[in-house]
Amino acid sequence: MIEILKQIAIIGAGGVGKEVALLIEEINNIKPTWDLIGFIDDNEELHGKYINGIKILGGIDYLSNNVDKIFVVCAIADYKIKKSIISKLENYNVEYANIIHPSVYISKTNLIGKDVIIYPGCILTTNIKIGNHVIISPKCGIGHEAYIDDYVSLLWDVNVAGNVKINEGCLIGSNATIIQNKEIGKGTIIGAGAVVVDNIPSYCTAVGVPAKPIKFHEGAK
């Protein structure tokens, strides 16, 4: 029986995009699933060029010309840029793909949204909710009943304990730890190596052990 591969384009030809292309390759090595047709990137200087053998097809408007539906995955970690791109795609004939590495340990009790990228070596235990447009980098651990809202990015080796809530648009730096029952407000950045032992407000940058806000930024009241 011939496998019918699903066409997919990666939005963003930067570092995350290159990594997602590798994830797709490794998924296909286990089970042929995706036909990666190329990158989508608004940097006109890249259009028509190749990165790691994969063509940059054009900008976001390239997707507006599709007659047949195509799958896309948004490989951009920046909250504001990513949200702006997603808003442009609302009326396009695209469907969001989840790209989850075969090595990920994940319970069937977890609820996973759309356009979710999960890298190798991650462990997601039980009754977790993951929103849309989320990136979970290698070796992250997420505990029971945790809630990861839309547009969150977890960088390498982040540990999220049980019953933690991470609100929309947060960026959690590498090796950060968030202990159980804590909440991180919308649009907040947690620095690399930080240990969150108290709730953290929205629209701030928090660093240290224990993590404390050091500045507030756009969006703060």
Image (cartoon, rainbow, N blue to C red):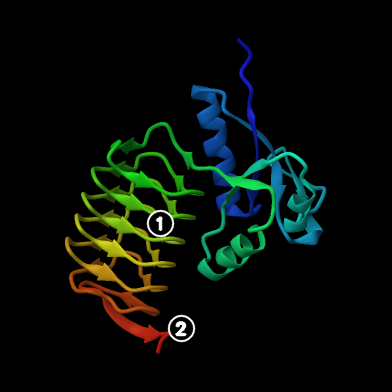
Quadrant the C terminus occupies: bottom left
Q: Secondary structure at mark 1?
A: loop
Q: Is residue 36 above or below residue 112?
A: above
Q: Is residue 211 above or below residue 128?
A: below
Q: Position of residue 45 (x, y in %)?
A: 80, 59
Any mark on residue 183, and which?
none
Q: For the view shown, which residue lies furthest in the top direction?
A: 1
Name the residue at 73% across, 60% down.
42
Most foreground residue, 215 or 61: 61
Are the residues at dot 2 and dot 1 in contact (C-beta closer than 8 Å)? no
Q: Position of residue 67 (x, y in %)?
A: 77, 42
**Count of numbered labels shown in the rendering:** 2
Name the residue at 31% across, 74% down.
207
Quadrant the N terminus occupies: top right
For disc 1, the marked residue is: 155
For disc 2, the marked residue is: 219
Residue 116 shown left or right of residue 130 in the figure:
right
Q: Position of residue 167 (x, y in %)?
A: 35, 67
Residue 190 shown left or right of residue 98 in the figure:
left
The picture quadrant where one finds residue 149 is: bottom left
Residue 7 shown left or right of residue 182 in the figure:
right
Name the residue at 32% across, 76% down.
206
Whole-angstrom CA distance, mark 2 to mark 1, is 22 Å
Amino acid tagged 2 = Gly
Q: Tell me the crowding category of disc 1: few under 14, some 14 to 19, or many 20 or more residues within 10 angstroms, Cα based.
A: many
Q: Position of residue 209 (x, y in %)?
A: 22, 72
Q: Tell me the crowding category of disc 2: few under 14, some 14 to 19, or many 20 or more residues within 10 angstroms, Cα based.
A: few
Amino acid tagged 1 = Leu
